[in-house]
Image (cartoon, rainbow, N blue to C red):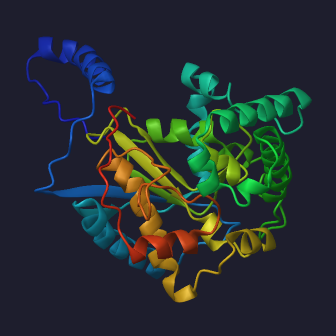
Amino acid sequence: MDYSHTEKAMKVHRIFLPLLIIFSCATLKDAPLKDLPADREYVISVQRVIDSRLPSLTEAQFQDMLDRLQGYIREYLGYRVSFYLMGNQDLLMFSKSMDFSESAETMKALKNDLLDMDSPADHQRLRDYIFKLVSRTETKVLRRYVKDYDTFESREKLADHLYRQYVVKLKRIQNITTADGTPLNAPAYAETLTYPFWDMALMHLKNAHFIFTNTVMADMEVNIPIYVVLRYGVTTGMVEKNLYNSYRAAGILFTYPFLSADGFFVSERGEAIPPEELTDVIALYATHEFGHFLNHYKDYYDHDNCIMVAAMDLNYYQWYRLRKEKKCDLKHEKLKQF
């Protein structure tokens, strides 16, 4: 925990300290984010959370990725950082530590957007949401993000195509057979594929600032950006507000989409990631998340070669090559709050 409150010697101060902490956290939570000065080095605690059924970076590869990430944060974001590695944690043990969140009001609110793959009503919610999303998205963004955009006769037909693709391919992802013979979304792991689980995990993370995990977030939900729809519900990383640390943020990167040898991901990546560049590709993609974490940058959709434009599909190597070729020199608006 990164609280900086000074312990008081007097009994009366000890009595009021819990109330002070609660008040301070509430005030901090609602206050606008402040820029982090770039003239100092920031220590970031990193936690690896491992699903033993899935491919993972070796310890040497992981350290190499962090070394590269450190350089990219300096190059692309202007910050000097060092990483403090926590011990690795098993995903199921991590999940168990989050049991408290199931009854939280915030979790209940988050789950209002989470859809059931077996519910016809939820399928209709997804279809309606994608239609509304496509309807309000600028044409220049759709042309940039949707392959063969001009071949669709109307936005309604495009939305229907995206809905059908989302449902079919998400089901394929969730049923990938893992190393122990169980599907990716086996009952013990199903919750760990969802946005509500990870959003709450980041909000309440106390022993680290950033998580790298070899699983994936892939669920059916509404109130998502166009690029998540185009990735069939896959989220590669995110940053959320944190209630405890001084950065007021916690982040995560899911490495399974980069590492999976399953035929689905091999095909959907489009371009194979050369083994010798794997850690570099992951490091550069993690830099996008640190653009949120450190710089408080917003996501963009229409900046060329921009580190703050997320991959529009699962072709991470193409995304990587474009950002290595040229940097974005446009101004980036900052978030007021996570």
Q: Is residue 159 left or right of residue 319?
A: right
Q: Is residue 271 left or right of residue 255?
A: right
Task: State the residue at coordinates (89%, 37%).
Answer: 118
Q: Is residue 305 visible?
A: yes
Q: Is residue 89 left or right of residue 246?
A: right
Quadrant into which the N terminus falls: top left
Q: Is residue 115 visible?
A: no
Q: Is residue 303 above or below residue 52?
A: above
Q: Position of residue 246 (x, y in %)?
A: 25, 40
Question: Looking at the rendering, which quadrant does residue 219 occupy?
Answer: top right
Name the outermost residue toward the bottom.
276
Q: Is residue 20 above or below residue 192?
A: above
Quadrant into which the C terminus falls: top left
Q: Position of residue 174 (x, y in %)?
A: 79, 54
Task: State the residue at coordinates (41%, 75%).
Answer: 324
Task: State the residue at coordinates (76%, 40%).
Answer: 155
Q: Is residue 220 left or right of residue 192?
A: right
Q: Position of residue 91 (x, y in %)?
A: 60, 54
Q: Position of residue 320 (x, y in %)?
A: 49, 72
Q: Is residue 253 above or below residue 192?
A: below
Q: Nearer the viewer, residue 45 or 100?
A: 45
Number of marks? 0
Task: State the residue at coordinates (27%, 34%).
Answer: 33
